[in-house]
Amino acid sequence: LDWNQVRQAVEGSDVVVHCAYGPREVNVNGTENVLKASLQTGIKKFIHLSTIDVYGGIEGEVDENLPCRYTGSEYGDSKIDAEKLCWEYFGKGLPLVVLRPTIVYGPFCKLWIAKFAERLQSGNWGVFKGVGGGLCNLVYIADLLNAVFLSLEVDKATGQAFNINGNETISWNEYFSRFNEALGLPRLREIGIGKSKVNAVLTMPFRSSARYILSHYKEPITELYQRFEVARKVMKRTEKSLRTTPSLDELSMFGRRARYSISKAKSLLGYEPAFNVDAGLEMSVRWLKHESLFSPNGLC
């Protein structure tokens, strides 16, 4: 968001790979800063990391011919606006490529690996009957990086948008089971749709109130946590429950049957995913153990 810092960072570079993201201001205003600096300094190729969220959560076979769709999601909508800026600057002469990755996982991934490892070991997680059959579009981080390098090298990629996905089509429940097996944990229990939704609804007020309390009363809450053991135990138990119980939005995602086509990336970029899900999970579990983020006896 600091124009002077962005301009200095871009100066002297041949290419820019823009991966930064955050709240709307970062995704939109920050992206424009990087685009503007890249145009001014004569960058030879600009790679913008977007997201499949720009499609708005539709189902079925999803390719790049489908229009972006606003849904009211801050993240998805702001990434649509960022893409609009990309095409505006492409029109001004900036050579660029837009990549729309699916669910990027692998070592160093906090959301889809570290967070879900904690959930799987918590005892609160399982396979979700009736809501976990949606498609989990996984792309291993090394495959995404390969797509970035191909986008830099292939001239005919300029001015194009590409979905970047893995080759395998598995359900969310299958992802949970295979990840759980890779961690060496006991077989997951089946959780019915009724219980899943009830748990999600029951935690809703706690999620929203926790965000409000932490944003307005962080100091007294911290003092209470430090001074009283009972308060610490209650807070830890509540926090664990919130972290390891799926929200209604997540349950909706787990049931969505969308497959993001990579035919265009294969034909124009020569992109071909090299990692299947089991190989990607094996590397991810190695990272978790190496960083002491997971042990068979409990998450560190």
Image (tube, rainbow, N blue to C red):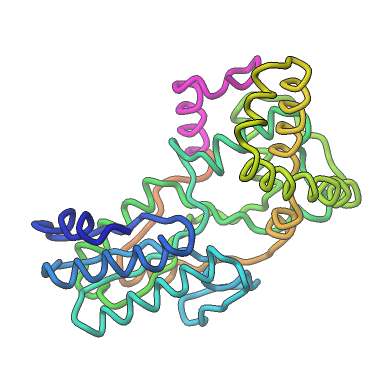
Q: Position of residue 236 (x, y in %)?
A: 71, 26
Considering every residue shown, the one lying at the far left of the view is 12
| Left or right: 107, with 221 as reference point | left
Residue drawn where x is 41% and y is 46% of the image: 141
Q: Quadrant of the N terminus?
A: bottom left
Q: Looking at the image, which is closer to me, 248 or 129? A: 248
Considering every residue shown, the one lying at the far right of the view is 194
| Count of number-bearing discs | 0
Q: Looking at the image, which is closer to me, 46 or 65? A: 46
| Residue 220 on the magenta span | no
**Residue 169 picture quarter:** bottom right
**What's the magenta region?**
279-300
Q: Position of residue 167 (x, y in %)?
A: 49, 56
Residue drawn where x is 38% and y is 65% of the image: 99
Q: Position of residue 204 (x, y in %)?
A: 79, 50
Q: Quadrant of the C terminus?
A: top right
Considering every residue shown, the one lying at the far bottom of the view is 91
| Left or right: 7, with 61 as reference point | left
Is 277 situated above or below 159?
above
